[in-house]
Image (cartoon, rainbow, N blue to C red):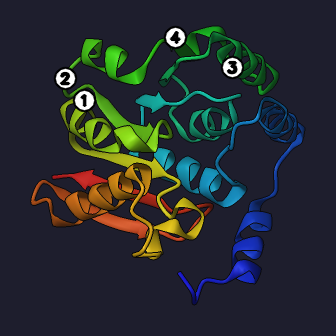
């Protein structure tokens, strides 16, 4: 983390650039007081969705649509994004962002509610990618649900695992940071996963289900 400094992170964020749709969605995110995935992380999600040929993607944490736009731009043209958030107002903002980006209404399925109440209702083994950007304290449960939802060869991604540097500070033992440390350890040590921790945005932990 120390070698990948702010200057390199800024270069990664500006490499692709964001259009008016993403700029507006990001501004809405700031206005509502939530953190959206950075441009480099979004570009990575788009790349991964395209590489997987993703047709079915599940997202934990709709936000105002920043990550969803990136995911939809990488998915197949007939792909559907199932996105879960506890705040319907955010989902309405995301819906507007998807529409502004030119996506048909049937490309996204919005499910309001707490992730751990919604995810058990989704079908086993039917998803190509699961993107987790919800409550860090629930990361372990998200991983468990993601492994159930993914097909073999599918991928799970967790945003924000660096925790703005807290992950690398051993003296920090608050429940949220400990939960993310446990997640990183469990993903790294799992025989069912092929993992990588990518230094984009605030840390993107990805793993392929074997």
Q: Which disc number belongs to residue 10?
A: none
CA distance separating discs 1 and 3: 24 Å
Q: Which residue is mark 1?
A: 149
- Above or below, 6 against 24 in this view is below
x 76%, y 82%: residue: 7
Q: Which residue was labeled with disc 4? A: 112
| 97 to the left or right of 132 | right
Circles 2 and 4: CB atoms closer than 8 Å: no
Which residue bears the numbered disc 2? Answer: 124
Residue bearing mark 3: 90
Q: Position of residue 107 (x, y in %)?
A: 57, 17
| Residue lying furthest bottom | 3
First in sequence: mark 3 vs mark 4:
3
Q: CA distance from mark 2 to mark 4?
A: 20 Å
The answer to whether the residues at label 4 and label 1 have Cβ atoms under 8 Å apart is no
| Secondary structure at numbered mark 3 | helix
Residue 54 drawn above or below residue 43 = above
Residue 5 drawn at (x, y percent): 67, 83
Of mark 2 and mark 1, the one earlier in the sequence is 2
SS for dot 4: strand
Q: Are marks 2 and 3 in contact (CB under 8 Å)?
A: no
Foreground of the two, 143 or 68 = 143
Q: CA distance from mark 3 to mark 4?
A: 10 Å
Q: What is the C-alpha distance between the residues marked 2 and 1?
A: 5 Å
Q: Quadrant of residue 35?
A: top right
């Amino acid at each position: 983390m120390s070698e990948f400094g702010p200057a390199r992170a800024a270069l990664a964020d500006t490499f692709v650039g964001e259009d008016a749709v993403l700029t507006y969605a990001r501004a809405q995110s700031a206005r509502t007081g939530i953190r959206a995935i950075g441009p480099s992380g979004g570009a990575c999600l788009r790349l991964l969705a395209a590489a997987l040929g993703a047709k079915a993607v599940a997202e934990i944490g709709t936000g105002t649509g920043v990550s969803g736009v990136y995911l939809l731009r990488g998915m197949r043209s007939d792909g559907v994004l199932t996105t879960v958030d506890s705040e319907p107002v955010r989902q309405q903002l995301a819906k507007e962002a998807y529409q502004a980006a030119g996506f048909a209404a049937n490309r996204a399925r919005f499910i309001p509610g707490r992730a751990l109440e919604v995810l058990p209702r989704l079908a086993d083994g039917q998803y190509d990618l699961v993107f987790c950007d919800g409550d860090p304290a629930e990361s372990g449960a998200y991983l468990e649900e993601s492994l159930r939802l993914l097909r073999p060869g599918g991928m799970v991604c967790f945003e924000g695992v660096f925790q703005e540097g807290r992950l690398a500070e051993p003296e920090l033992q608050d429940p949220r940071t400990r939960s993310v440390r446990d997640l990183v350890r469990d993903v790294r040590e799992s025989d069912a996963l092929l993992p990588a921790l990518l230094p984009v945005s605030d840390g993107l932990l990805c793993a392929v289900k074997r």
